[in-house]
Image (cartoon, helix red, strand yellow):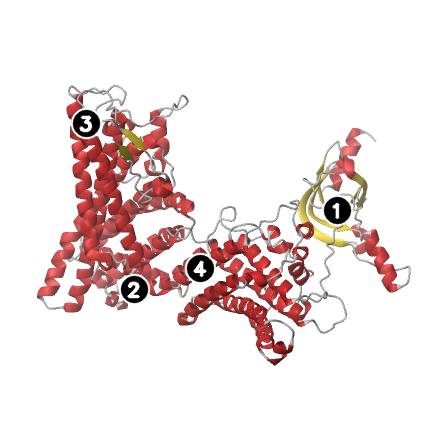
Amino acid sequence: MDPKMDSGVLQPGETLEHDYDLQKDLLPEEVVGIMDQLLCYETAWHEGYPLSQNLFTSVHLDRLLWPEPRILEEASFDRGKPASPMAMMNRILRAYCLALIKCCDRVIQTVTSRDYYEEEDFSTHTYNRSLLTQIDEAEIQQELSHCWEWLVGELGTQYNISNDLRRALESRLGFRQTLLSAMHQDATEPLNALDPLWRVTATFLGDMKSNHTLGQPVPEAFSPKLQRRLASTVPPRPVVEYTFDEAIQKMTLLCEHSLETIQAIDIRSSSAAGLLSFTWAFASHKPQPLAYPRALLASFIFGGPPEAFSSVLQRDLEELVFTEDTVLDPLNWTIEMSRSSLIPHDPRALIAKTIDDFLARISQCYAYLWSTLCQNRCRIRRMLCHSLREFDHLMADAEIFDNELHDLSKDTLSNPLMTWTYYHKLRQVEWVVQLGFEQEIYQPDELVGMYWWLSQIASSRYTVLEHILPFTRRRHARFAKKKQLREASSVGRTVDYVDAMVKEAKGTALLAGCLSTLYALLHYLKLLPVPERPYSAPALRYELRMKPFLLTVEPPTPPPFEEYRQKTHPLGDYDQPSSDNLSRSLKAMAADADDAVKMAKAEFAALKKLGAKAARCEAVEDAWKKNIASMLSSCVAAGIATSTVKAACSAHSGISRPPSLKVEMPEAWKRYHDWWVVPKVIN
Amino acid sequence: MSNERAVGYLTQLIGKTLRITVTDNRMFEGQMKCTDRDRNVILALTHEYRPPSEEAIKKAIAESGSSSVTLPHSSRFMGLVVVPGEHITKIELEDRSLNQPPVL
């Protein structure tokens, strides 16, 4: 029999049962030791390892969970034995374990209620064991408070344990109590209660860290053998070990991230663009938020009554194309369609119907976009590739709706719905490319093309925004003239927002253009290594890279390969440039790149001046500022690189390689900004 | 038995519940899905049953004081498994007719 193929096979002399006595009275030190080990295993589970390789190796948890307890009293360490009063230390450990199991149950419920990827994010497999799902949380809380009261009360003080140990046990019980309460809240409950819970949980973790050394590890209380009794054909696998410090650090981060997600509820009801910037800031945390906080965020975005999420979509339209527009006037929805064919419909009722039809058409794609942003970082990029195609297909429909609207409402931006859809599509294309840089999808010699493509997209985006801006400005002036202050300030915010987005898009286009030119230049100077690719053709590689965008039907679609090649090879083949006066052409390219980076820097600086509020990022102002600062640093670094190359080109006439130049590509973690791969050119 | 009859016999076992004992005395009970010339058997919805170890029996006898004690087999659900033919010591077919009233 092969132990690798058969999870049930026993080695000669090996027994199925562990030889740990669960009825033995535990010392307080041992209880602390077991609790801390359990926390390490819980962390491993949150990090994505299956329960079999961590928590389910605990003899205590195994006894509590199998056979499945129907009532809480059945979940005890001395099952099937005549009931005898349990030693208090064992009882404390039992309460801790019960709460731990209930926390796990809650985590699984939260994660599975949202989109997640079992093989990438989180293992929800419980091996046919129910994690006390049937048992009420209040009962477990009661058991915890009972132990807590005993510990701090008179009885506990008579018990022979030191004050330090008592405090260690207190903080562990307190941690479980607050964590369990925090995990049991949902979006329907008053949130001011949730906020302090996560904070207190994090403080308990700090206490636990300081008195961890008081505990005494009990390795016998954990056995990988227990995996043999789980409903699984997988043979026992090695147990995943985390150190206690790591566990505390990761769990503290989990609390902080969970705490942060609560803000989403307030932001959701105030601004769609704000929610978007918040979600991006959350997803960009390093280390990346774990599956549980991400699911929590998704449940806050989508949770609550169904109209709560659909109002986000409506607000999104309002913030970009319909600010203070009669199209979204709530009054429109109060007017009935005429029932007689002789009386024409009220145009306002028709507007409401058109908008409702459009919202119904788009709501699924829109929800998909948001659930994409709650995934892990790599998933976000891959799912955006699908999402952008959905938005692409929507554009044709949006045009039809726009034509209907055009006849109904005169004072409205031309093609508002198509503009909105197009804008969202372009942003997603940009994100896909930029996440590609972040995740090092592209080889150094592909950067010329990808930055060129990014600059194309960003230019299209600011063209769209510049279509919105004059109209919004006119509307703002009109309201201001009429002294309609509320309307004027609301349109004024949109003007600021669109203006900020224009600056951001322009800066992105310019910096991307600069980097594309700079990389092309470095190729002509033969400073970048090009790997040998005997089995692939440039045209096919181009098709592969552009695949997510080639399938879109609306412009901008990637150009045919010849055109792309011509754009990225302005002076012909990198090995044999076909320019009459090569050194002059190279100089001109360097000057172009230099100009572009200067302008990009000016745009980003202007954006910084407009401030986070204008960009509707006030909720994540710090992250926003940091992001702008990193983009500005990238501009500075790009500026240094271009001017070094420019100087070298001027000093050196002729095509031979300027001897003193050397190029270093920065590693992903050394970049100023994840999305900007700026080479370091050393003279 | 001719090849044709053998195939016919094995075919009618498909979907029936089998109990297969292997060399270390464990039993696997599940629906037969297929078999091959090496007597490997694939069972679906399988449960694994393990007889109590000798030590556990000794301990139980010592505790109860009488020589006839009942100890349960420990069992777990496993799902789809392949039982290698070389380890099989016994194959039993569940006879539903004893437990259930005949269908009229």
Kindly identify which residue carries mark 2: A270
Q: CA distance from mark 3 to mark 4?
A: 54 Å
- Residue B89 visible? The answer is yes
Q: CA distance from mark 3 to mark 2?
A: 53 Å
Residue at left offset 18%, top offset 47%: A603
The quarter of the displayed image where residue A634 is located? top left
Q: Quadrant of the C terminus of chain A?
A: top left
Circle 3 chain: A
User: What SS does tag 3 mark?
Assistant: helix
- Residue A344 visible? The answer is no
Kindly identify which residue carries mark 1: B28
Q: Amino acid at mark 2?
A: Ser
- Mark drawn on residue A71: none
Label 3 crowd (10 A; few <14 / some 14-19 / many >=20): many
User: Does A508 appear above or below A26?
Assistant: above
Q: Amino acid at mark 4?
A: Leu
The answer to whether the residue labelled 1 contacts the one labelled 4, judged by CB atoms less than 8 Å apart, is no
The answer to whether the residue labelled 1 contacts the one labelled 2, judged by CB atoms less than 8 Å apart, is no
Q: Amino acid at mark 3?
A: Cys
Q: CA distance from mark 1 to mark 2?
A: 60 Å
Kindly identify which residue carries mark 3: A649
User: Does A242 appear above or below A95?
Assistant: above
Q: Quadrant of the N terminus of chain A?
A: top right
Residue A623 located left or right of residue A59: left
Q: CA distance from mark 3 to mark 1?
A: 78 Å
Residue A27 located left or right of residue B58: left
The quarter of the displayed image where residue A596 is located? top left
